[in-house]
Amino acid sequence: MVGAMSGLGGTSLREQIRRSLADAAPEAELMGPRTAAIALILLELDATLELLLIERATREGDPWSGHMALPGGHRDPSDSDLGATAERETLEEVGLDLRAHGERVGRLSDSTPVRGVPLAVRPYVYLLAQRPHLTLSAEVRKALWVPVAPLLNGERLTTHSFSRGDQRFEFPAWDVDGHRVWGLTYRVLNEFFRRFNALL
């Protein structure tokens, strides 16, 4: 599919992404004990796509400590909506002002973490036209711009395992420079890839 990433019948990548997200239902209030939003940030350069992943800092008591993730976090009472949450958290975590430098092109299905944390998460998709300078907060150990094509093509598929009590669980994952991308982040990205791939 890599060759098809350069265009579909003359359609730009930006337009393909918009079309892949066009069938979302009208946005409704997100229900749950706690709500959060994350940002799937895509960088379009020379007819190729990259996405932004962060490695969360190791912090005691944080269920996502050290995980690979998309920027985002819990909704604050001051946020006008969950889109504002995704944008505020991205600015706080990596210093990227999505309102000034990004275009919100759609959203993906609401999700919940696989570990049973009582949290409802709404993912939004943003497009950038230029590679931004990032300033990482203490919550973020590393930020990676990851080429989309190898993930889209299934080249980096692997599994991730963890144990809870006497039970062992195994989940699909990607290997990104030695980091495992799994769980909610994997499911969000996989949904976007399925939608995008359907147009290629």
Image (cartoon, rainbow, N blue to C red):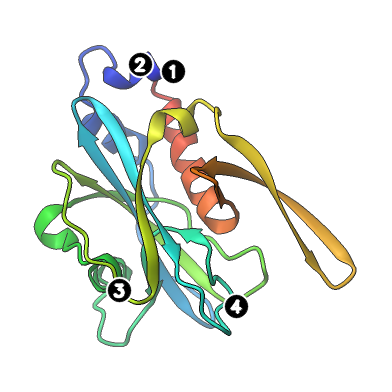
Name the residue rendered at 39%, 19% in the picture: 2
Q: Can residue 28 be seen in this view?
A: no
Question: Which badge, 4 or 3, is on the more N-terminal residue?
Answer: 4
Indicate the position of residue 11 as horizontal and vertical percent values.
Answer: 22, 20
Residue marked by disc 3: 137
Report helix, strand or loop for mark 3: loop
Report helix, strand or loop for mark 2: helix
Q: Are marks 1 and 2 in contact (CB under 8 Å)?
A: yes
Name the residue rendered at 51%, 80% in the picture: 59
Outermost residue, bottom side: 77
- Left or right, 63 with respect to 195, comes to right
- Left or right, 56 with respect to 7, comes to right
Name the residue rendered at 30%, 74% in the picture: 137
Q: Which of marks 4 and 3 is in front?
A: 3
How much space separates mark 2 and mark 3, taking CA atoms?
37 Å
Residue marked by disc 4: 118
Residue 23 in the image: above or below residue 33: above
Q: Which of marks 2 and 3 is in front?
A: 3
What's the amino acid at mark 4? Pro
Residue marked by disc 2: 4
Label 3 CA crowd tier, 10 Å (few <14, some 14–19, many 20+): some
Name the residue rendered at 47%, 66% in the picture: 121
How much space separates mark 3 and mark 1, taking CA atoms?
36 Å
How much space separates mark 1 and mark 2, taking CA atoms?
5 Å
How much space separates mark 4 and mark 3, taking CA atoms?
25 Å
Q: Nearer the viewer, mark 1 or mark 4?
A: 1
Q: Nearer the viewer, mark 3 or mark 1?
A: 3
What's the amino acid at mark 2? Ala
> Quarter holding the N terminus?
top left
Residue marked by disc 1: 1
Locate residue 129: give its quadrant. Answer: top left
